[in-house]
Amino acid sequence: MLELLDKRLIFVTGKGGTGKSTVAIALGLLAARRGLRTIVAEVAEQDRVARAFGHADSHFREVELASNLFTISIDPQHAIEEYLSLQVRVKPLADLVSGNRMFQYFAAATPGLSELVTIGKVWELAQLQRRTRGAARYDLVIVDAAATGHGVATLRAPKTFSDIARVGPIARQGRFIHAMITDPSATAVVAVALAEEMPVTETLALGRTLRKQLGLELDRVIVNAVYDERFAPREAGELDRALESAGTPLARAALRAALSEHLRSRAQRAQLSRLRRATGRAPVLLPFLFDAELRQDAYERLAQRLQDAL
Amino acid sequence: VNVADVLADKRVCICGGSGGVGKTTTAAAIAMGEAAAGKKVAVVTIDPARRLANSLGLQELGNEPQLIDPELFAAADVDMRGELWAMMLDPKRTFDEVIERLAPDARTREEVLGNRIYQQLSGAVAGSQEYTAMAKLYELDQDGEFDLLVLDTPPSRNALNFLDAPDRLTHFFEGRALQVFLRPTGVAGRVMGRGTGMVFSVLKRVTGVDLLEDLSVFFRSISGLLDGFKERATAVSKLLGDTKTVFLLVTSPEREPVDEAIFFWRRLKAARMPFGGVIVNRVHHDLLGDLDVEDVTVELAPELGADLAARVAENFRDYHVLARRDRANIERLTAKLEQPGVLMIPHLDEDVHDLEGLARMCRFLFASETERRALLDEVVA
């Protein structure tokens, strides 16, 4: 798996609620620990990554979270302004444009422009020669991307725009960005799933959509929150019998919890085999963490698991 | 909180919440419960919950509600007195239909539908799913075919976007003003503010002329639809705020979804949208209380052996961590929402993906307090 960390850009996407941010952070920690200057870029304006490390705000700022590990939360408004200032190069003129009402209409009204500038900023972060003045280069950019459908639309935006624009700066840059996204030596797409019916279905659909619309393959599927198999089927039978004769409510509750765990774990295994059969490859598994809240040590444990699995 | 009471005099029920919290199944279970009680109900979903859909006999994305075969309910031991209809929304097709309906003539229609920028918009751009969901809801409400419409909102990570959807689209079509922009020397150009001419020339440099021209064509062809869109957006806003509409928030008891539920509630309040209550799915109930988990080992060791008994105890301890977490998050939720109670559904052993599962969920949603306690005992203790 470590070849995954040899890329310059990793998109982490998947169904809502599967733990994309968690996986992006754990991947980021792993990369940073291995000496790569890494940034986890968020696109949902929730500052989740920063908050996981006790920082309140990473609003369009590159914030250092730990040694070698940075984060930024990208929003379209700032991305557009930055893009303009990079293009125009004369600050008062750029300010005049972005403050102009016509321009604001243009920005709000153009379908897909938010997606385009967001991915444009991601691309800029991944450049060896950063365009932002004074910005240092990163070895690896990990994108905590939008959920499946919107995630794919974001990946497709540069191509759509370069096709429409044909010539000029947007067409040119759209082509650059598209070329990088579709270059498997530079970019990886990782899907995060849960071992449940709908997330597995959506992951398989994501794989098909990526192939059809962008000619991309999913590099890895990471299945989050997998239960250990704590009880063998034979033991489950014993638990069942014990439940029938259990004397106290406490014992009954504990046995119920054990049988639940067994059932859920079994249902998860079934979904994991379904995923494996359909993708022809074993997914990377991350354990369900019985933590009340994920703190830095939890991410460290997940990073360790990723290292072992990759 | 009892769903039947909340929905007693409602025509529209919108389920909101972040992704992965069981929103689609909750919406389906609510619709099924209301239909079982005798109403004609349609549930509108965007999530491709294939297996659930298939178990309801829905094979394809269709843009019209389909009646769920009553036989299926009989087979699942559900006493269905009304009708349950369901549809999985195809956002692209819904958007096309809106254009078809609003276009003043065939030429405009073809011009818009064939425009590449329109195609990008109607695909998967942020906001378009939300808009189409609202558009469909509005149409179904206008048709008046149903006693109750239940909408499962789009699975966007920032589930709040759809509240803005009507306004956002209006704002979007302010882009008509862009035509002025493309002829910056006219009177209108001067009205738009200082520097518009210069802005235009910068933009031309930045984007390329072709893109601007395509946009110009797009805005010109769609401008004929603008008034219809505005009218509709206003009507949708009105529908969302109507006394016959209610929003239910669906969440799991984990931190992030609870944060989003709180955020969502604030937005509802700020937008003066009618809020009906919160449904918390997958709750781990505290079964340990003041007891000591070590007693589990002691009590079960004679029958199960020390090793297995110890593992049962360890699993129970882990379970209890989740129960405590869930309780803390739910307390935070109720405190923030100034709500005395939320409707809790326990973490069931199996995912809900068939009619039996929906029926099980229904029982929790529509139970009285006493019934719910009995159900809970059945499931967890």
Image: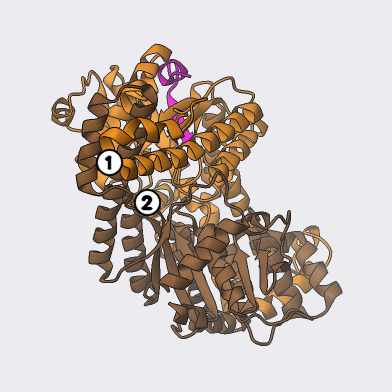
Chain colours: A brown, B orange
The quarter in which the C terminus of chain A is drawn is bottom left
> For this view, does B172 lie left or right of residue A226?
right
Query: Relative to the observer, which residue lies in front, A206 or B140?
Result: A206
Q: Secondary structure at mark 2?
A: loop
Nearer the observer, disc 2 or disc 1? Answer: 2
Callout 2: few (<14), some (14-19), or many (20+) C-alpha neighbours within 10 Å?
Answer: many
**Residue B61 visible in the snapshot:** no
Kindly give the residue lying farthest to the right in the view shown.
A92
Where's the N terminus of chain A, which quadrant?
bottom left
Does B201 sit left or right of B273 as displayed?
right
Q: Which mark is residue B239?
A: none
Q: Which residue is mark 2?
A: A227
Q: Position of residue B273 (x, y in %)?
A: 59, 29
Q: Quadrant of residue A217?
A: bottom left
Residue under numbered circle 1: B353
Residue type, numbered disc 2: Tyr
Does the image show residue A130? yes
Front residue of B226 and A184: A184
Circles 2 and 1 on the same subunit: no
Residue B169, magenta (yes or no): no
Quadrant in which residue A280 is drawn: bottom left
Q: Provide the residue span drawn in magenta.
A: B1-15
Q: Residue at x 65, y 35 (%)?
A: B266
Protein chain holding label 1: B
Please tell me which residue is depicted at 27% across the width and 41% down the height of the picture: B353
Q: Are marks 2 and 1 in contact (CB under 8 Å)?
A: no
Specify whether residue B4 is painted magenta. yes
Viewer-closest of A235 and A152: A235
User: Is the residue A62 above or below the residue A234 in the image?
Assistant: below
Residue name at image x 40 percent, y 14 percent = B368
